[in-house]
Image (tube, rainbow, N blue to C red):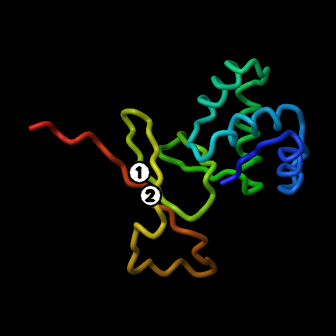
């Protein structure tokens, strides 16, 4: 989890991740990391930025989220074809996903037990395993 408290700390976090601390990156980092761990779509962050008076395009939001992910500041959680959430918690964990409400909930990494994985194809190693458990509302009796 990355919490950015001051302007100087925000600059240092971006520089440490190999990113140039532009005005837009700093503004978006402040929105993303100010209040602890969260899951956000590009569209959610775009609306937050507009509400905060930050002049930024949706394309810039997407680019910044992908740059932050590549730099290790975020983790992308693909929940459906063409739909991803970006997670500020980059530690080992898994997710519940409730598509009707668009809610992503963290599952502690140790709460999921995998006994055996298939052998990867020749020339490949397993990089990581991410579990997304899809939820639906229970039927009422």
Q: Describe the element under mark 2 as helix, strand or loop.
A: strand
Return the residue at label 1. 96
> Quick one: quadrant of the N terminus?
bottom right
> Which residue carries the number 2 mark?
107
Tell me the element at label 1.
strand
Q: Position of residue 30 (x, y in %)?
A: 75, 36
> Which of the pair 67/45 is nearer the observer?
45
Q: Nearer the viewer, mark 2 or mark 1?
A: 2
Question: Answer yes or no: do the residues labelled 2 and 1 have beta carbons within 8 Å?
Answer: yes
Name the residue at 61% across, 29% down. 43
Residue depicted at 79% across the width and 20% down the height: 55
Q: Of 109 and 127, which appears nearest the observer?
A: 109
Image quadrant where residue 29 sits: top right
Gap in angstroms between the C-alphas marked 2 and 1: 7 Å
Q: Residue furthest front?
A: 5
Q: What percent of the width, then of the height, locates residue 132?
A: 43, 55
Dividing the picture into quarters, in which one does residue 85 lie? top right
Percent position of residue 59, x then y: 73, 30
């Amino acid at each position: 989890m990355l919490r950015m408290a001051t302007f100087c700390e925000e600059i240092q976090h971006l520089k440490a991740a190999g990113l140039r601390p532009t005005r837009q990156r700093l503004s978006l980092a402040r929105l993303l990391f100010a209040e602890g761990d969260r899951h956000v779509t590009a569209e959610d962050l775009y609306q937050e930025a507009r509400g905060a008076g930050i002049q930024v395009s949706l394309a810039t939001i997407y680019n910044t989220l992908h740059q932050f992910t590549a730099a290790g500041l975020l983790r992308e959680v693909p929940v459906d074809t063409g739909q991803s959430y970006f997670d500020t918690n980059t530690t080992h964990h898994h997710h519940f996903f409730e598509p009707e409400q668009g809610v992503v909930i963290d599952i502690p990494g140790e709460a999921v037990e995998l006994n055996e994985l298939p052998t990867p194809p020749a020339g490949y190693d397993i990089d990581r395993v991410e579990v997304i458990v899809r939820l639906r509302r229970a039927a009422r009796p």
